[in-house]
Image (cartoon, coloured by chain):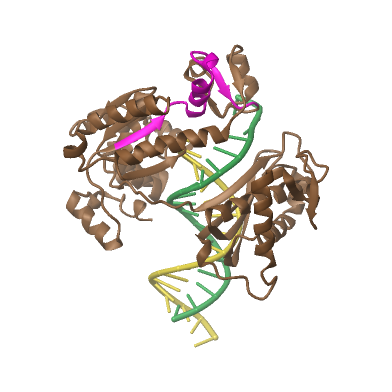
Chain colours: A brown, B green, C yellow
DNA sequence: TCTGGGGTCCTAGGACCC
DNA sequence: TCTGGGGTCCTAGGACCC
């Protein structure tokens, strides 16, 4: 939304006044002053080390087939997240591999966020393990940003038992870079006035939004540091990277990042996907997997009180290229039947593609989310039953676990379901 | 690096409306 | 009959992030 609206060009250099004006117009509250970026270190792996003393000081890998997270002892040996498990074991044969325990991580995350929120009311969650904290205006009550950061780190260590790194600066971007530089278990304050000295020697890959593709484009022109990007000029960046990315990078390299810390950001989509393994699977296997994913996503939507209008099907073929197909419903829905019918219809349209190219991943996601309470009831068809059935199934699964009920189409497939209930 | 699962945002063309 | 410009929505693809 307005995030990117006024990152724009040099004319929008925003002093506090200018920014307040814009924010007043669009009804947002401007958050001034220093920002903390707090980022838990090797989060999943640290939770495992906390809960099992035998893992402390040793290389730990969370996740089997693919590394979801690894401890710093494993990182020192070259293990990285998203790396294949086999390669990780070659690099680090003595690593201890543990299965992920998502509920333990959620619990730890909630405890950390409670500490964030008693530190300041201005908390913007970025993911399960990191957040921005606005600490402007807290000087009298809580001390300087550095003092707040020291206390925050100590409290999280003492109360939750986890190491966390904090970066402090006057913009979100610099606070985030500072924490990345300070990792692990560190604290780094970028002093006011020292921003460009800190920023310009850094490699371009530190810029937010510079991944492998953009980095390669810059490298081909001999540009390796943020300082060189800043010297490039906006027009040159726009012609190299396009309007959006070019202006964005120009602003960041000149330390113009006016994005305020936003407390209430709502999720914009809810989805799930699953890889079908290296050998490509049949159409009916893809269909079965999608039925299970749709169930999961719809349950999550109902639990969150959201309903969505745009259903997206995601495919990955045997050669690892990807495709998406989407369809927008007339009204938002959280009904499994409605969403599943849409998914099946989209899938049917890709049947020739799947049969010629092979399928290795399917996923769905639902976007254009609205509050479920504001959703217009489904009118002519299925007078009420769809919702009632969903609600009944949700209750059973809540009490007896997800495997208690499953779709007939899944019976006998690898995910070991039990009692058929839904006709298919 | 032979590749998981959850997301966000941007771009671009076409349909459609005024 | 031929023509213009602006705005919004939908769809598909892609880069990027944790």
The vertical placement of A164 against A242, above or below, is above
x then y, percent, for residue A135: 25, 40
Query: Which residue: 51% across, 64% down?
Result: A373
The vertical placement of A54 against A99, above or below, is above
**Camera-side residue: A213 or A421?**
A421
Whether the magenta-drawn stretch holds residue A59 is answered as: yes
Whether the magenta-drawn stretch holds residue A322 is answered as: no
Locate residue A333 relative to residue A400 in the image: left or right: left
Query: Which residue: 24% across, 52% down?
Result: A12
**Camera-side residue: A361 or B7?**
B7
x then y, percent, for residue A181: 35, 25
Residue A225 visible to the viewer? no
Tag count in the figure?
0
Locate residue A248 relative to residue A213 in the image: left or right: left
The range drawn in magenta is: A36-64
Query: Which residue: 69% across, 38% down?
Result: A319
The vertical placement of A351 against A187, above or below, is below
Locate residue A58 relative to residue A202 in the image: left or right: right
Residue A387 visible to the viewer? yes
């Amino acid at each position: 939304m307005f995030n990117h609206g006024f990152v724009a060009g040099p004319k929008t250099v925003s002093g506090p006044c200018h920014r307040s004006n814009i924010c007043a117009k669009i009804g947002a509250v401007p958050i001034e002053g220093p920002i903390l970026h707090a980022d838990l270190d090797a989060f999943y792996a640290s939770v495992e080390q906390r809960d099992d003393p035998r893992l402390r000081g040793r290389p730990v890998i969370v996740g089997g087939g693919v590394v979801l997270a690894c401890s710093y002892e494993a990182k020192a040996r070259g293990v990285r997240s998203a790396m294949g498990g086999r390669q990780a074991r070659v690099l680090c044969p003595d690593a201890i591999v543990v299965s992920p325990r998502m509920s333990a991580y959620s619990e730890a995350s909630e405890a950390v966020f409670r500490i964030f929120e008693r530190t300041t009311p201005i908390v913007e969650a970025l993911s399960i393990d990191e957040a921005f904290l606005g600490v402007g205006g807290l000087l009298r009550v809580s001390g300087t940003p550095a003092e707040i950061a020291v206390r925050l780190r100590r409290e999280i260590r003492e109360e939750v038992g986890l190491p966390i790194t904090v970066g402090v600066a006057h913009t979100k971007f610099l606070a985030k870079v500072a924490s990345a530089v300070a990792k692990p278990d560190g604290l780094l304050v970028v002093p006011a006035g020292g921003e460009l000295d800190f920023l310009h020697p850094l490699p371009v890959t530190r810029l937010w939004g510079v991944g492998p593709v953009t980095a390669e484009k810059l490298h081909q022109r001999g540009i390796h540091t943020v300082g060189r990007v800043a010297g490039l000029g906006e027009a040159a960046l726009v012609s190299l990277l396009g309007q959006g990315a070019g202006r964005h990078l120009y602003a960041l390299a000149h330390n113009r990042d006016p994005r305020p810390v936003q407390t209430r950001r709502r999720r914009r989509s809810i989805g799930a996907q699953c890889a079908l393994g290296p050998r490509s699977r049949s159409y009916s296997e893809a269909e079965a997997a999608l039925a299970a994913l749709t169930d999961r996503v719809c349950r999550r939507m109902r639990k969150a009180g959201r309903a969505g209008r745009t259903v997206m099907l995601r495919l990955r073929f045997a050669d690892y290229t990807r495709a998406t197909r989407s369809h927008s419903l007339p009204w938002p829905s959280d009904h499994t039947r409605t969403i599943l019918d849409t998914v099946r219809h989209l899938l049917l349209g890709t049947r020739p593609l799947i049969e010629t190219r092979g399928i290795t991943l399917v996923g769905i996601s639902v976007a254009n989310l609205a509050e479920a309470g504001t959703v217009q009831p489904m009118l002519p068809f299925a007078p009420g039953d769809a919702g009632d059935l969903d609600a009944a199934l949700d209750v059973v699964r809540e009490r007896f676990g997800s495997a208690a009920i499953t779709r007939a189409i899944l019976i006998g497939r690898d995910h070991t379901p039990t009692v058929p209930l839904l006709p298919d």
